[in-house]
Image: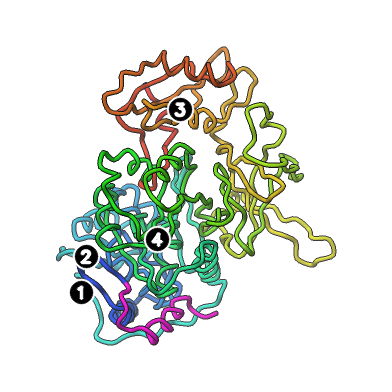
Amino acid sequence: MANLVTDIEETVAASPDATAIGYDGQKITYEEFWIQTGQFAQALADAGVEPGDRVGVYLPNLPQYVIAFHGILRAGGIVVPMNPQYKSREIKHLLGDSSAVAVVTLADLVPQVQEVQDDTDVHTIISVGGDAEGATEFGAFLADDTLEPVDRDDDDVACQPYTSGTTGTPKGVLLTHRNLAFEARASPAVHDGIRADDKMLGVLPLFHIYGMTVTMLATLYEGGSFWPMAEWDASAALELIESEELTIVHGVPAMYNDVVNHPDADDYDLGTVRFANAGGSSLPLEVMRRFEELFEPRLLEGYGLTETAPVTHANRPDDRRPGSIGKPLPGVESKVADHNFEEVAPVPEGPVDDETELDEVVGEIVISGPNVMKQYYNRPEANQEAFTDEEDGEAQDGTRWFHTGDLGYYDEDGFFYIVDREKHMIVSGGYNIYPREVEELLFEHPDVADAAVVGVPDERRGETVTAFVVKQPDSDVTAEGLKQYCLDNLAEYKHPREVNFVDELPRTTTGKVQKFELEDFE
């Protein structure tokens, strides 16, 4: 395989006038898209960006993001995606750690880059959406000529996203051309692939691996059309799906929760959607149930991480089990391991009931496959902790297992189930408590719109189970009422000793609850 962007050339040759990108009433054909990526690649080369150099993309979901991303790869560079909500202090680490030499960003964000530029290797700034002092406007930056894709090896790094940093300094993840090419094909294949007439909702942030690979790359490599949205808004998303007759929707659970709680949700016609998927964090069963009551497509859950590019497991339209993250993708291996790295035996069939002792069936989910990252960038200790090499009998090369840090179990049919993050497990009075179990119950309560459960230090018990709840509008539910509800449905040691009502939960832009903020709640 050469540079993975060359795959798009086949679509350009076969369907030059087909829509590659749709945005705000405008459409960019594949031929126009291919020319602009070539012009962007040539402009990078003219600016002194060499193959192997890193270029930051500090943008929301816009057509220029898609063009810049592919142009960087076409020039043989490495994309460093950056959250456009980050401030100077946050991007300083990403730019400095990666040694990026150029940045593409909104005109309004150029000052953020300039504030830290002297502490980085950045010599070129390209602005989107207007002129900015010290930057070259995107259209003016494009060269007259186009650069042919620079040859890259399968194992060359294509992209360096950063972990969310919710538990420490964000780490650069080295994803290769092979990693991304595998995922762009393998993940859509479990739902009958992406067709040339498919239209993909592009609302997942493109700086995040889920949006980047499963929506943008997968769509363009199969010749479909990609419809980015610059920010999440439930009403705008529903309107776009209906008006443009979009056919594939990917989102995080928080987005689907917004949809099912939308006051006019049942007024929208989503009849053109043939596939809907949730990932990024655990999908509450109640959100799945309510979505499927409102709309025709079943909502399928998958699983993955930045380090696995991202999808490792998925439910199939014709082979799913609610409550499960599905089975491993073809070509991906997964198992559940205990603290001694011995494989934990499967349960007969999941999900397990309340009488099952989770500690007897739960272990860490580990992954091996062509989607697993090369390594963390300049983090030898983190790399040592992240991988276990296991000998394969007489084979010369053993299996390289990546530690996800997620606790779960699997059943004899091959379905896997996430219980919780290892670092989120609560130990109270000697008992192991998995927050997701309590959260699932809270989501079933009619007065609860959103919920998260954390462990708070307690001198007597070690940790106390504490719930944070967003009420449904006009609800008069009380903390005592919710505590009693949990007592009625869970073992006594699992119920929240404290319930706090909040207007909203602190979440990342990809919908993950930032539990460290809740643990420090006062």
User: Which of label 4 and label 1 is nearer to you?
Assistant: 4
Q: Residue at x 47, y 38 (%)?
A: 284
Q: How far, Cα to Cα, is label 2 from label 3?
A: 43 Å
**Element carrying mark 4:** strand
Nearest to the eye among marks 4 and 2: give it: 4
Give the amino acid type for the residue marked by disc 4 in the picture.
Ile
**Percent of width and height locating residue 215:** 41, 62
Q: Which of marks 1 and 3 is nearer the N terminus?
A: 1
**Residue 501 point in image, percent of width and height:** 35, 23
Whether residue 422 is visible to the viewer of this picture, yes or no, is yes
Residue at image location 41% in from the left, 48% down from the top: 252
Q: Give the range drawn in magenta.
A: 1-20
Q: Given contact means CB atoms under 8 Å apart, are the residues at marks 4 and 2 in contact? A: no
Q: Quadrant of the C terminus?
A: top left
In this image, 502 relative to 282: left or right?
left
Q: Which mark is residue 248?
A: 4
Q: What element carries label 1?
A: helix
Q: Which mark is residue 139?
A: 1
Circle nearer the N terminus (2, 3): 2
* Number of disc labels: 4
